Image (tube, rainbow, N blue to C red):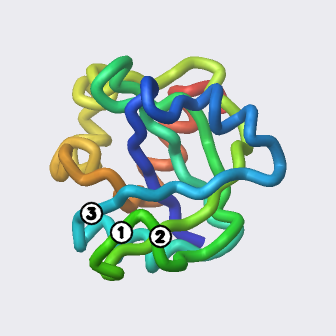
Amino acid sequence: MAHWLIKSEPEKWSWEMQAAAGAAGTHWNGVRNHLAKLQLMAMKNGEHVFFYHSNEGKEIVGIVEVIREFYPDPTDETGKFCMCDFKAVKPLKKPVTLARVKATPALAKMSLLTSARLSVQPVRDDEWKLICKMGGV
């Protein structure tokens, strides 16, 4: 199974809001970048995804699970973009900040650093394991 990272501005959709959605989860829409769309289209049910607070906080704060694979995003008037549904799995015991990721040589090639503006990113297995360890999960 693949691993991923999605970014959300906490003032618009925070980890706390995601967790409050419970087992039913919620959709994650608004992607308007073609590479991010392709990442969403590659996600499979059951895969785990880091939940990252962008702009404010700039840290990985939790893990969500894909519970519905890509489907059309009704907020997209062009009909070109899609969305997935996620449910919260667990928070990281200790959020992993962007500064900490940057300071970790083993994470130097992580998409979070090399494709910083991309809102949906793949995460390699070694990166996943290290971030989980850093976050106490």
Q: Secondary structure at mark 2?
A: loop
Compared to 116, does 121 lie above or below? below
- Viewport quadrant of the C terminus: top right
Do the numbered discs 3 and 1 sit on residues whose CB atoms are within 8 Å? yes
> Which numbered circle lies on residue 54?
none
Amino acid type indicated by mark 3: Arg
> Which numbered circle lies on residue 74?
2
Task: Return the disc, 2 or 3, that comes first in the chain's sequence.
Answer: 3
Amino acid type indicated by mark 2: Pro
> Which numbered circle lies on residue 76?
1
Q: Which of the 4 image quadrants contains residue 135?
A: top right
Do the numbered discs 1 and 2 sit on residues whose CB atoms are within 8 Å? yes
In this view, the mark in front (3 or 1): 1
The spot of residue 41 in percent (x, y) is: 45, 78
Seen from this angle, which residue lies furthest right? 23
Q: Is residue 62 left or right of residue 98?
A: right
Q: Which of the 4 image quadrants contains residue 47?
A: bottom right
Amino acid type indicated by mark 1: Asp
Q: Is residue 130 left or right of residue 97?
A: right
